[in-house]
Image: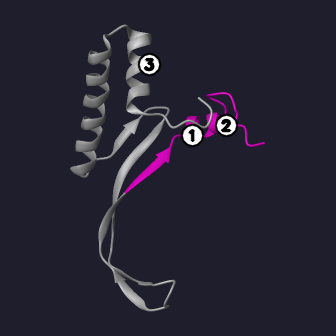
Amino acid sequence: MGNKTLTRADLAETVHRDIGLSRAESAEMVNDVLELVSQALVEGNSVKLSSFGTFLVRSKRERMGRNPKTGEEVPITPRRVLVFRPSQVMKNIINGHEPGTDDET
């Protein structure tokens, strides 16, 4: 895929091509999966995709930050942030190693 951004339409087209569902059914399936993942995260659950990684929501406490322009200290409100931790398999793939190997060269 190069440097192109992978979109919902790309995912739906791949489902259509590889599984043979209609384009509309493929788009609906992709949307349903993404909605399920999103809802689980909103509810505070983690989402683990084997051989890919884990999505989870972390709560950050209130803290003091600094405006980089003025240097003024400002409070940063508490918030929830989305975190992705890639699996070891994904890390190996990204680094050009064969899946299933843990070569640290």
| Residue behind mark 2 | 102
Q: Gap between marks 3 and 2, in whole Å?
A: 30 Å
SS of the residue at dot 2?
loop
Decide: is 92 above or below 85.
above
Question: Measured from the top left, where is residue 91 in percent x and y?
Answer: 60, 41
Decide: is 26 above or below 98.
above
Question: Measured from the top left, where is residue 3 in percent x and y?
Answer: 61, 37
Q: Amino acid at mark 2?
A: Asp
Q: Gap between marks 3 and 1, in whole Å?
A: 25 Å
Left or right position of 95 against 18: right
Q: Quadrant of residue 27?
A: top left
Question: Measured from the top left, where is residue 65 in percent x and y?
Answer: 43, 83
Judge depth for marks 3 and 2 and give the one in front.
Answer: 3
Query: Disc number at residue 50?
Result: none
Q: Amino acid at mark 3?
A: Thr
Q: Amino acid at mark 1?
A: Gln
**Residue nearer the viewer, 37 or 88:** 37
Which quadrant is the C terminus positioned in?
top right
Crowding at mark 3 (Cα within 10 Å: few <14, some 14-19, many 20+): some
**Residue range of the region highlighted in magenta in the rendering:** 82-105
Query: Disc number at residue 88?
Result: 1
| Residue behind mark 3 | 14
| Mark 3 vs 1: CB contact within 8 A | no
Q: Quadrant of residue 25?
A: top left
| Chain-order first, disc 3 or disc 1 | 3
| Mark 1 vs 2: CB contact within 8 A | yes
| Chain-order first, disc 3 or disc 2 | 3
| Chain-order first, disc 1 or disc 2 | 1
Q: Residue at x 46, y 84 (%)?
A: 67
Q: Residue at x 29, y 39 (%)?
A: 37
Crowding at mark 1 (Cα within 10 Å: few <14, some 14-19, many 20+): some
